């Protein structure tokens, strides 16, 4: 059982881009209602599938340089990284079944 990890500009390369397994990065902010709505869903997915997929959270207010680098214009935005590359982008809050369907190839 694993919980989402917090990533920052200081450890983004190591924890996300150099990860040996796929990483879903949740670009979020404290003030974002939909971000808060999907947080427990991402906790559940992390607990259930953490052995296959790492869930990471990046606060766009605290880490705006990374958000700008990856073109985050709307949150929540979920990027799936494999071997350092963005292979899937999911925009907006979705219910758990819809998120699991989007993540089928990675879990």
Image (cartoon, rainbow, N blue to C red):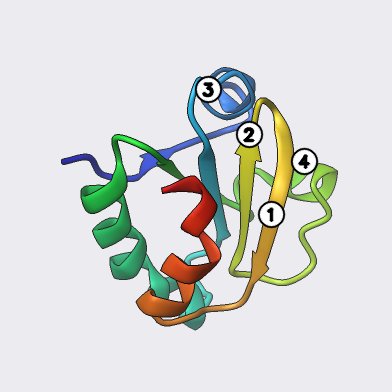
x 22%, y 52%: residue: 48
Q: Residues within 10 Å of mark 4 (few under 14, many from 20)?
A: few
Q: Nearer the viewer, mark 3 or mark 4?
A: 3
Where is mark 4, residue-wise? 65
Quote the CA–CA distance across marks 3 and 2.
Answer: 8 Å
Question: With 77 as the anchor, is 100 left or right in this view?
Answer: left
- Earlier in the chain: of badge 4 and badge 2, it is 4
Where is mark 1, residue-wise? 88
Answer whether labels 3 and 2 touch (C-beta < 8 Å): no
Question: With 104 as the anchor, is 39 left or right in this view?
Answer: left
Can you say whether 45 is above or below 7 in the image?
A: below
Q: Position of residue 97 (x, y in %)?
A: 38, 77
Circle on res. 82: 2
Q: Quadrant of the N terminus?
A: top left
- Earlier in the chain: of badge 2 and badge 1, it is 2
Q: Does any portion of residue 98 appear in the rendered image?
A: yes
- Earlier in the chain: of badge 3 and badge 1, it is 3
x 36%, y 61%: residue: 42
Q: Secondary structure at mark 4?
A: helix
Q: Choose between 107 and 30: the one closer to the eye.
A: 107
Q: Secondary structure at mark 2?
A: strand
Q: Choose between 88 and 69: the one closer to the eye.
A: 88
Question: With 47 as the anchor, is 37 left or right in this view?
Answer: right
Q: Nearer the viewer, mark 1 or mark 4?
A: 1
Q: Secondary structure at mark 1?
A: strand
Quote the CA–CA distance across marks 3 and 1.
Answer: 16 Å
- Earlier in the chain: of badge 1 and badge 4, it is 4
Question: With 27 as the anchor, is 73 left or right in this view?
Answer: right
Can you say whether 90 is above or below 51 in the image?
A: below
Circle on res. 19: 3
Q: Secondary structure at mark 3?
A: loop
């Amino acid at each position: 059982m694993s919980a989402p990890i917090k990533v920052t500009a200081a450890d983004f390369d190591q924890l996300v881009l150099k990860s040996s397994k796929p990483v879903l990065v949740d670009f979020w902010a404290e003030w974002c209602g939909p971000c808060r709505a999907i947080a427990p869903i991402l906790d559940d997915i992390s607990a259930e599938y953490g052995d296959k997929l790492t869930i990471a959270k990046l606060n766009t207010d605290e880490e705006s340089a990374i958000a700008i680098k990856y073109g985050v214009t709307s949150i929540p935005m979920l990027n799936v990284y494999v071997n350092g590359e963005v292979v899937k982008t999911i925009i907006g809050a979705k219910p758990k079944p819809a998120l699991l369907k989007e993540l089928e190839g990675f879990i």
